Amino acid sequence: MRRDAGRWLSAQREKAGVTQAQVADHVGYRYYTFVSQVEGGHGRVPSEHFELWAQAISVDPQAFAKKLLGYYEPEIHRLLFPIAE
């Protein structure tokens, strides 16, 4: 699921026309390699950084949090956002 999240993050970043270094700078990371690791599925965006990361890639913060929760915590996502039958 982390790889899928990473692919989604990468696609959103590219769609916004920003680099990994720009995301890192906006969020306050010292090195862009953390962004690269997350996009490669080797890490996850810390929840306390969801809003800044969303702003950096021009995604609504609530939509960003909901999407990543679906990847990182699918059971919690399922409980909070059940599929209407």
Image: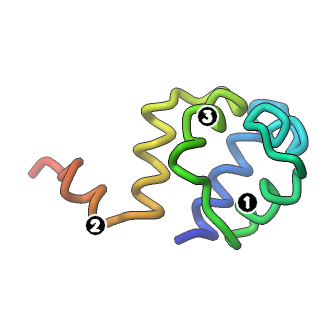
Q: Residues within 10 Å of mark 2 (few under 14, many from 20)?
A: few
> How are the residues colored?
rainbow
Cα separation between marks 1 and 2:
22 Å
Q: Count residues near mark 3 (Cα–Cα under 10 Å), then give few for <14, some for 14-19, many for 20+.
A: many
Amino acid, disc 1: Glu
| Residue shown at the point (80%, 58%) measured from the top left | 34
Rendered location of residue 75, percent (x, y): 28, 66
Secondary structure of the residue carrying numbered label 2:
helix
* Element at label 3: helix
Helix, strand or loop at disc 1? Answer: helix
Question: What kind of residue is marked 3?
Answer: Ala
In the figure, is residue 48 to the left or right of 21? left
Marks 1,2: beta carbons within 8 A = no
Which residue is rendered at x = 52% and y = 71% of the image? 1
From the image, tell me which residue sits under label 2.
Answer: 75
N-term mark: 1 or 2: 1
Are the residues at dot 2 and dot 3 in contact (C-beta closer than 8 Å)?
Answer: no
At 61% from the left edge and 34% from the top edge, which residue is drawn?
A: 54
Mark closest to the chain's N terminus, 1 or 3: 1
Residue 62 image position (x, y, % from top left): 43, 32
- In terms of image quadrants, where is residue 56? top right
User: Mark on residue 39?
Assistant: 1
Q: How many marks?
A: 3
* Mark 1 touches mark 3? (CB < 8 Å): no
Side (left or right) of 72 relative to 4? left
Determine whether, in the image, residue 60 is placed left or right of residue 83.
Answer: right
Image vertical order of residue 70 relative to residue 53, above or below: below
Which residue lies under the disc numbered 3? 54
- Alpha-carbon span between mark 2 and mark 3: 22 Å
Going by the numbered disc 2, the residue's amino acid type is Glu
Residue drawn at x 63%, y 53% is 8
